Amino acid sequence: MTKVNRRIFVLGGLAAASTLALSRPASAALAFPFNLGVASGDPLPDGVVLWTRLALAPLNADGQGGMPNQSIPVEWQVATDDKFTSIVRSGTVTATYADAHSVHVEVDGLQPDYEYYYRFRAEGHISPVGRTRTAPALDVVGRDLLMAFTSCAHYESGYYTVYRRMAEERPDLVLHLGDYIYEDGASSGEGVVRSHAGGELVSLADYRRRYAQYKSDVDLQAAHAAAPWLVVPDDHEVENNYANMVRNDNSPALDLTGWKNRRAAAYRAYYENMPLRGPAKPNGADILLYRRVRWGQLATFHMLDTRQYRDDQACGDGTKYCPEAGDPRRSLPGITQENWLLDGLAQRNGVWDVIGQQVFFARRANASDAVSMDAWDGYPASRDRIQKGWVQRGVRNPVVLTGDVHRAWANDLKVDFANPAAPVVGTELVTSSVSSGGDGTASTTIPDAAYNPHLKFYSQRRGYVRAKVSQTRMDVDFRAVDKITTRGAAVSTLRSFVIEEGRPGLQNP
């Protein structure tokens, strides 16, 4: 841990009690309850969401983390320094048994474009310290933004070294593009580095317990404590390859009541364990997660949900499997979300329009003409509407950020992918995974390169993408580690690109 303030991750805010302005007396009733760490997210110019969840025994099968069936007051503080000598905001919130003692604090009244530190206290115990920051004011560009993004952290496949290396970058913002947890049960044998607790996730208790297991990992806790996060789920937070009412075998959910109950449990646990604002609190089996986050006049983040709203009108009611990939009525994000995205892009509020989403956006052709139904290739008319839409609206710098595929890719985007001479209209950056897929190999040979000249980089290693965003350019580094099946691997840059303002596409630095 060479680049990280050890007070944040080791001392974790266990400072001398004399520095605190926290009034509740210590109690012997509970042991240390902050075993799942702290987090912040969805920054605004004047505030940010703070999160923690109390858990004495995170792996208890009932999903309640060993906590008593009672409400517990949790105090919180925000300061301008990590020693908390200058506290600017504080308060108390109640952690309830019904919400698995999770806490969401929507702090306001902060200064824009500013770094802060935060911590919690419950029953006399002090949490680790987190570092966060606010977005710039809406009428200014602000400082350059250092962001990092990743996805897909299968616990059994390896250690979370990628999260640790991301934390050491001290980014201003982290984006997680889905598969924060995996829903499968405990495995054994080759390729299993550490085991899931319990079987396949079905109930609310199951999902809560799985989040607690993942969040007990110290490297994940370090990444959360390093910076505010923007999060969106993919499929494994519910079930592999699910989409709308379609199950993972591409057939309709026959037991719709049971399926909706499982979705409701999954999304409730997701909200309980993420630094999300109140509007994202789920309503039964539905959760509203697509949203826009402004970073002053530098960038607008359009965060999409490509699972819940897949509109397969070619099949009637959206509850059947639709093989007709070319049918123009198909929409991967759903028509409502498509229109929401295009309306936001038309506002051109930032130098950069960044679209955070889950599945592969660019075309990936192959000799067999096989089409992935779990990518935008399965919805080409939907992709075409969005790309033509941003061209028609004069969007200068669209950049699509993608997870899901456990590989790193860098892609030029074209309205006509079949024409090598067609102009480049955008850029896609695809992150590799945190651990899903194991160590990977050193290969950087682009699959089916002859059919896809717009695909510019490929890597099988585990890692993340680091990007420094300024008014004139985006400097992109694909970062990776050689191993995640053993702890502590170093990180290196496999390839770097530049995206120039007003010039979509990938350039060499």
Image (cartoon, helix red, strand yellow):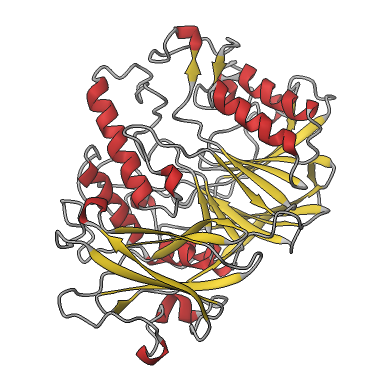
Quarter of the rendering containing residue 288:
top left
Image point 43% across, 43% down: which residue? 280
The residue at the point 65 percent across, 64 percent down is 112
> In the rendered image of this protein, does residue 366 appear above or below residue 347?
above
Q: Nearer the viewer, residue 236 or 244?
A: 244
Q: At 68% from the left edge and 60% from the top edge, which residue is drawn?
A: 136
x, y (%) of residue 294? 65, 50
Q: Position of residue 20 (x, y in %)?
A: 40, 85
Is any part of residue 437 visible from this angle?
A: no
Front in this rendered view, residue 139 or 431: 139
Q: Is residue 26 left or right of residue 400?
A: left
Screen quadrant of the C terminus:
bottom right
Left or right: residue 6 compared with residue 264: right
Q: Return the x and y of residue 326 as percentages of the image width and height.
A: 59, 11
* Picture mark count: 0
| Percent coordinates x, y for residue 140 in the rendering | 76, 58
For residue 360, which quarter of the picture? Answer: top right
Please indicate whether residue 491 sits to the left or right of residue 55 in the image. right
Q: Nearer the viewer, residue 505 or 312?
A: 312
